[in-house]
Image (cartoon, rainbow, N blue to C red):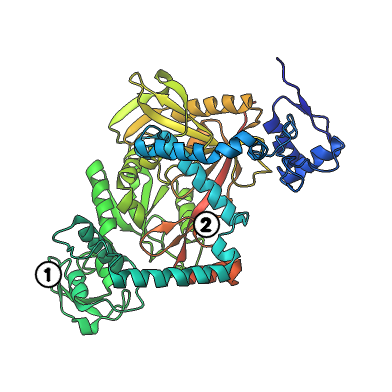
Amino acid sequence: MKSERLKCMFCDRDFGQEKPFVTHLENAHEVVQGEEQMKLYMKLNDINDRPTCQCSSDCDKQIKWLGWKKGFSGSRYARGHNAIIDTCFRTKAKEFAKKREEGYRSGKYKVWNDGLTKETSEKIVEMAEKTSATLQQGYETGRLVTWQKSDPDHAEAAWKKLSETKKENFATGKTVPWIKGLTKETDERVANISQGILKYFETHDRANKMKADEFYVIANRHDDKFELLSTYDDYEQWRVARLKFRCRTCNQVQEKSLAMYCDTPLCFNCHPKSSQPQLEIYDYVKSLTQEEVLLNDRTLISPKEVDIYVPSRNFAIEYNGLYWHSEACIKDIDYHQKKHVACEEKGVSLLFVFQDEWRDKRKIIETMIAHRLGVFEEKLDARKLRVVKKKNDVAFFDQNHLDGGVRAKTMFCLVDNTNRVVATMSLRSPIYNDKKYSEYFEIARATCLSNVNVRGWLGKLTKACHDFATSEGKKGLITYVDQRVGSGKSYEKAGWKMLKFSTGNRFWWTNDWERFDRGKCKADKTRGMTEKEVALERKLHRIYGCTNSLFVYEKV
């Protein structure tokens, strides 16, 4: 049976499906989905008052609006309220509940997700992500408010009661700490917690001094390279440089804070102007090529310096320590962008690597470097691979994309004859400027399998995604290219056009050990705090990258 088409009451454009019609009303005519569109529906259908449940004279529960095609529910009762007038159900309700309880207890009945986890079920993962995103959006927009905030007096009373109950239970022995009697030597959990505490001391600024035994454990961590000359009495805070160390190689005495000692365990006399991770990257590059590799080069974009430079490949690398490259040390938010532009003008591709990326995503960084040096473990040709449409695989992007996986509508993959996925491109509705680019799909993530070079993959997957987009009534595709890792030339070769060179510099929040998304810190209206004040309270500051460029693909 052919479904009824919906015609726009403002511009006479018609739609076969309700979803694009609803989106059209919001984007083209600014009639927001939900309450506003329902009121418009009532006005057009001469409905003065919204229908209410008829289960009783005093029930004011409203009947659900099911959308433009179905209108209001045909039932006279709100969901579940029909049971109120069903005498049989009312008298038997307790009996039914008792049978269900006994059934679940005996194992006769089971919930659908019994025994399933995020590691064993894709459905659990999908539902968890959807729930998390819905709750986060609700709290960020103010649609949802925790009861602690909405009723602070009740919350304070509840916390006080909970505290008193806990104190009483511990005092009487009713509650016993799980850790009681356990040590690092007898319980793995305690040992892991101990290591976590030490890691915290190593990676965070502290308002209070750590204890002496903890200090000596950390300060002697690299005793194969340095001899500690200072004592615990000389120690103040994590980043206060008042500790003296003697290099065991050159015997030079130098001052280092604990932060510098742990993050960069190098003698600057033996290794001038180089950090340990920077030297690791340098050694990795040298292991891939027999060509000249320069360290701390000042000839390329003099007087500025690039950490690693391979002249024959027109390729350079910058290692960015999170503290030294954050706004705590660099006030120019365009610092990294200016270096990128200076190298581009010299025809050199500059790759920026953050401290946490080299530490936590080293395999991905090594693959990116190897690709730029023309070193691959495996080479494939896209024309010999099949295009397959799949559900978005966040895990694949977590393992192969620098920014990890994100939620997306769907993804298209290139697979070989063993059905192995070797390249992917995921699609979603635009999350920035959504009204302006609502007639496009956005490429959320695009990448190849690590250590695999797939010639022509970008063009083939672009075509597949564009064909899907047009079949969904879209004009084409858009995507954002982070100039910190690439200039977008490969997209241009695949037929994309640059729509905007700069959409503004990307930034993250950092605690000097890891980076967090820009949404990590927001102004707290309930406490009257600005974004900057919230960040200061959490001991976070910004670290800037390069700008994003906006590209569009529309097949003529």
Given residues 249 and 482, the one toward you in this image is: 482
Q: Is residue 530 among the parts visible in the rendering?
A: no
| Location of mark 2 (residue) | 519
> Secondary structure beneath disc 2?
helix
| Amino acid at pointer 2 | Gly
Q: Nearer the viewer, residue 70 or 231?
A: 70
At which x and y percent is residue 492?
Answer: 53, 35
The residue sitting at 55% across, 68% down in the picture is 154
* Residue identifier under label 1: 248
Q: Residues within 10 Å of mark 1 (few under 14, many from 20)?
A: some
Of 353 and 200, which appears nearest the observer? Answer: 200
Q: Is residue 254 above or below residue 117?
A: below
User: Could you tell me residue 8's position as x and y percent?
Assistant: 80, 32
Question: Do the residues bearing badges 1 and 2 touch, measured as CB atoms within 8 Å?
Answer: no
Pick whichever of labels 1 and 2 is earlier in the sequence.
Answer: 1
Q: Residues within 10 Å of mark 2 (few under 14, many from 20)?
A: few
Residue at (83, 43) in percent of width and height: 49
Give the secondary structure at mark 1.
loop
Query: Does residue 265 sit above or below 82 in this rendering?
Result: below
Q: Percent from the top left, x then y, of residue 143?
A: 63, 54
Determine whether, in the image, residue 466 is placed left or right of residue 253: right
Q: Nearer the viewer, mark 1 or mark 2?
A: 2
The image quadrant of residue 399 is top left
Q: Quadrant of the C terminus?
A: top right
Name the residue at 61% across, 34% down.
Answer: 88
| Residue 206 - label | none
- Name the spot of residue 301 as percent of width and height, x first: 42, 57
**Label 1 to label 2, Cα distance in Å?**
45 Å
